[in-house]
Image: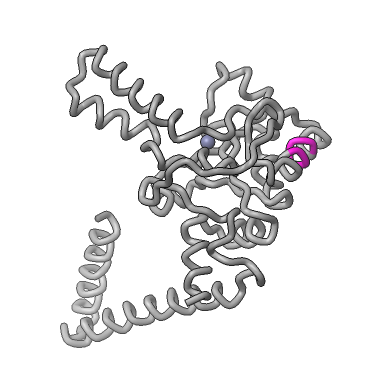
Amino acid sequence: MVLRKRSLYLGVLVSLSLLVAGCSGQQATAKTATARQSSVAKKTTNRQRLIRQLPKGVKSTDADLIVVNKWHRHGELSFKKVQVDGITVRQSIQKPLTAFINGAEKAGYQTSAVSGYRSVADQKRVWNQSIATYKEQGKSAKQALKLTREYVAVPGGSEHQTGLAADIINTKWFTSHGNQLLSASDQSKGQRWLINHAAQYGFVLRFPKNGVRSTGIDYESWHFRYVGRASAEFMTKHHLTLEQYVSLLKARES
Ligand SMILES: [Zn+2]
């Protein structure tokens, strides 16, 4: 909506400046159309260039690249689980996650693993509890559902059910901010270390600031997702969300 308004505004500006310069309306329309075509062509070229550069041997169907979000919900997934630093994760990420946490510690930043695997059943419980709490506060059923949708992942739509996601936060920042997961934690050096080095260990910051439209989730400076090193480095370099990355892989495979 905002974009449409802005392009309308720009269109008016272009027309006005062309009128002032003595150009005819017809020329203005032709110029605007050419500008639009070249912008579409540029986007297409960028996408094709990215597709050509995608890491070799990676497929959209790889287990590490499963996409779970509010548009792609899943039932309970089955995999081996282990404990790392007090949280449960998929066994396949035990080594990289341990290395990631140890790497931060070696750099002088102690981290806290706050949340890992969460079953669909757990998500349902959190969802129902949220609705019940809002109703107790006097909200209508409709309001309670609306508020819950804003703050709680739809059951079956949380990345935490993959066992490939972990909420990791700098301990010093976390404990001095009431043990809360807040996006402002990226102001701490320790959290920035995690964000800047995640790809080396095969992780990405899953909900980046510039990815809200494709992920459906607001910026989270603590939620890391394992995707494998080649994919993590590519996604980080090109500022791609998992949704965008998998879409490029699918295009290469089609
Ligand atoms: Zn999370």
Residue 19 appears at what percent x and percent y? Answer: 19, 78
Q: Residue at x 20, y 68 (%)?
A: 12
Above/below status of 24 relative to 91: below
Quadrant of residue 98 within the rendered picture: top right
Q: Residue furthest right?
A: 106
> 105 left or right of 216?
right
> 196 left or right of 37?
right
Q: Residue at x 45, y 28 (%)?
A: 122
Residue 37 appears at what percent x and percent y? Answer: 33, 81
Residue 7 appears at what percent x and percent y? Answer: 27, 65
Q: Which residues are magenta?
A: 98-102
- Decide which of 210, 55 is in the foreground and name it: 55
> 226 left or right of 102?
left
**Is residue 101 shown in magenta?**
yes
| Number of numbered discs overlaid on the protein picture | 0
Residue 120 appears at what percent x and percent y? Answer: 44, 35
- Assign the N terminus to one quadrant of the image: bottom left
- Decide which of 12, 135 is in the foreground and name it: 135
Q: Residue at x 56, y 56 (%)?
A: 65
Quadrant of residue 166 within the rendered picture: top right
- From the image, give the main secondary structure of the stretch colored magenta: helix
Colouring rule applied to residues: one colour
Q: Residue at x 81, y 36 (%)?
A: 107
- Decide which of 96, 28 is in the foreground and name it: 96
Quadrant of residue 42 within the rendered picture: bottom left
Above/below status of 36 relative to 144: below
